[in-house]
Every structure is written in structure tokens, then in C-alpha cells.
Image (cartoon, rainbow, N blue to C red):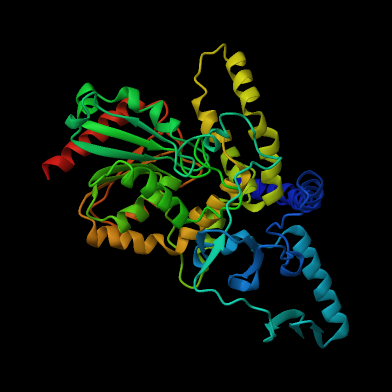
Amino acid sequence: MGIARWLNRTVGFFVFALLDIADFLLCYTYKTLDYFLESERKPCYCSSPPEAQAKTEKIIVSERGGYSKVVSLTRSKIHLDEISDTLYSRGPSLLTRLSKLVRSVKCFNYKGLIMRGNVVESCDHGESKKKIRKAKKRLMTLNSTVVEKSSTAPRWSDCHCSFCTSWLTSPNKDSLFVKVQQPKDNKKARDNVVFIHGFVSSSAFWTETLFPNFSDSAKSNYRFIAVDLLGYGRSPKPNDSLYTLREHLEMIEKSVISQFKLKTFHIVAHSLGCILALALAVKHPGAIKSLTLLAPPYYKVPKGVQPAQYVMREVARKEVWPPMQFGASVLSWYEHLGRTIGLVLIKNHHLIEFVTRLLTLNRIRTYLIEGFLCHTHNGSFHTLHNIIFGSGAKLESYLDHVRDHVDCDVAIFHGGKDELIPVECSYSVKSKVPRATVHVIPDKDHITIVVGRQKDFARELELIWQRSQST
């Protein structure tokens, strides 16, 4: 085991060093392509503040840590405290480490204090200590929110197919796509169940697995509601959105809770969806009848550690094995490599689906491709950082609130072989909410906890809902 881990980390060091260089080069490649294809060099998260030039109807927003982002003026509100610092600061890359080495060598040669702009570097026993001096900066005072314009047209590197852009021609293009299965006589629906999918997924994760497998009794007593989250499937994919927790919640409230006038409802959520489910429970404590969480990404953050950075390093460890871990690392650490993957795979998802059906002689259903590939890099990158990583400082208080103020059953399911979110995360949730029950499903991973055992899981959910009715 020790040798395998050492080999994984050693190979990973060289692989990710090459990826550091590739992402650096792709940064300039995309800036050039964006300029020729969109007549604008749009800023990225590896841009330093001076490089992010404000243009017409745009402002530079100073965020935590002194970083900046160009934000367009718009009607929708963006709260800066919901922007994760991992977007800009994702740890030292190979190029960063080399630059630090060069600075340390210079520091050693001069044997003194080196002044570089606003940074003072002290050479003491070969170690460089940085102290940031107070400097005069041009700051724009904002009352906790920034107004941002939402662009609708897909970028040149996004998929332009009728499925991915269906929201643009929809009469409800400002609302999420919602799939509803309800009794023929809607008045007989005893209660509602809201299903929230995980990262790079869609409502098909539920509608193609669970919906057909619920019993006739459940189908005649419950209204099932599954949504495509903002940026996924057939839901809106605004280019300039930062996909913050607030934006996701407001869209769910508008498209589901308000649209269907839900007074009470059960929630079933997977992975990323667990964070949104807990946030909904905090905002609507009296409406939640039961809370079912599948593979919740809750990591106990040690004291004195930056929460978002810690969660990112737990979720996206720089390792080449297992493959799902490697994929999560690439998507998390490399903005431009992630965009390249989208350019190659997302824009060709119809071809990938066709080839998959051809190779398997149409023996498997390809509904998962809808979730894996029908989104935009901008939406996924921001959702990953602003919600999964950025919620590291919020989940503990959410769980405390659920424990103390939300009177409902809490059931947790986790695959025993989940290589992406460890089982310990579910036990950590139980440590915060003692009444929660944890069900570890042997030999199942992050996806097969539902896919492949949908009949069993449908029965388990029905029992949870029935139990909530009797309490």
C-alpha cells in the first residue's frame, strides 16, 4: 500500500508538472482565439489585476486576497462573499515554484531586503518572508453587492446544439428545466419530492432510474419533481454568471418552490446537490419533511485552515489514480485544460452518444451523457469552486441548523467504494446531526449507489417517506 501510494504521488508529480505548463500555454492560446472569434480578450482566473482591464460598462471588483475580476453591469446581484478564493488561488504550480526558486536565489545573492513594488522580501537563513505594505489602491466602494450582466449567446467553445441551447427559445428561459411526474389526478398527490442532482449531472439521473421504479402506490400519492440545475442539461447557461450558491438557490426557489406552490416537500439530493439541499433546509426549515443525502461532500475543516482551500485539496488531490480522482483534479486545478476538455467532449456529445450506442450495440442507455456533457465549462468551473469548495466554511453551520431547527428525518447513503467522496464524509455529517442514519452500500461507488440499484433505492426512499408521514 505504501509503495502504491508513493508511485501514485511520484507519477502524479511529473504528470501535473506537465499539465501546469500546458495550462499556462493554453491561457494565451484561448486569449488569442477569443479575440479573433469574439473580438474580445476575456479575463481568466490566472490574470493578475492589472491585466484585467475594465472596459465599457464593466468594473474591476476587488475580492478577498487582493485579486480582481472583471464584472459586467447587470440587473442580477452577485454577493462577493460567495465567490470562492480557490478560483484565483489554487496553490503553487510548477511555474510558480520555479519563480519562487529564482526569487530565493536572488534573495540569497543580495543578502538583504529586496523591494519589489509593494512587497518586501526578507532573507533570513535562506527563507523569504513577505510583508505586504499598505499601498494606495483605487477601490470602488460597493454596498455588499455587484450588478452583473447575464450574457445569453453561447461562446464559440460551447456546444450550440438544439438540446444545449433549448433554454434560449423556451418561454421560461429565466427558469430551470423541471421534469415532473405526478398522479393522473393531481389532487390525490399527498406530498412532493424534490430531486437535486450532483456535479456534471442532470435530472435524467433521477428520471431515468428512480421515476420508472417507484411503486404504483408511490406514483399515486407523490408528485416527483427533478430539476436541471443552473448551467446543466436544458436549464439556462448564462455566460457571465458566477454560479454562486445564492444564484442556484434562487433559481430552485423560483422554478420549483414558487412555481409549484410547495408548502412541504421531501428532498433527495446527490453529491453537490446535498449542499443545496442543506441550504434549502436552512431557508425553509418548516417545509422539509425528510432529507435524503447521497454522498454528501462534507469535510471537517481543521482550525486555522482556509476552508475552501482545504476542501479543494481533499476533493481534488493531485493524483493520477483512480481515474475519477484524476479527472476531478484536472477540472479543479486547471481552468484552461478544463475548457479544452469541454471543447473536445461537450461540443461533440451527440457523436460520443452515437459511438457509445454503436459500440455497445445499443445495449446500454446513454442518459448519463446528458449530465456529463450537456453543460458549459464556465458553469461547471464556477459551480465547482463557488459551491463545492466555497461551501467549506458554511456546511458546519448548515448542519448545526438542521440539527437544532429542522424537524425531519435525515437519511444518508454512501457507496462503500466511492473513490471521489470518502465514506468518512457521511459519518462526519452524522457526528453533527446525531439523529441521521447512515447506510453504506457495499461494492457501490459515487454513481452506482443509484444507477444499477434503482429498484432497491426506490423502495428505500418510499420507506423513508412513509416513516415521515407517521411521525
Residue 266 percent location from the top left of the image: 27, 42
Asked whether the viewer can see residue 364, the reply is yes
Residue 17 percent location from the top left of the image: 75, 52
Relative to 250, say whether 214 is above or below: above
Q: Quadrant of residue 207?
A: top left
41 and 8: which one is in front? 41
Asked whether the viewer can see residue 448, the reply is no
238 and 3: which one is in front? 238
462 and 415: which one is in front? 462
Total numbered labels placed on residues in the image: 0
Q: Quadrant of residue 442?
A: top left
In the displayed image of the protein, which residue is found farthest to the top?
Answer: 361
What residue lies at 53% left-to-right and 55% top-to-bottom? 314
Relative to 409, say whether 403 is above or below: below
What residue lies at 35% left-to-right and 64% top-to-bottom? 397
Q: Is residue 267 left or right of residue 247?
A: left
Residue 62 percent location from the top left of the image: 62, 71
In the displayed image of the protein, which residue is found farthest to the right?
Answer: 109
Q: Quadrant of the C terminus?
A: top left
Q: Quadrant of the N terminus?
A: top right
Q: Is residue 186 left or right of residue 43?
A: left
Q: Quadrant of residue 148?
A: bottom right
Residue 456 percent location from the top left of the image: 30, 27
Q: Is residue 124 left or right of residue 228?
A: right
Q: Is residue 440 left or right of residue 13?
A: left
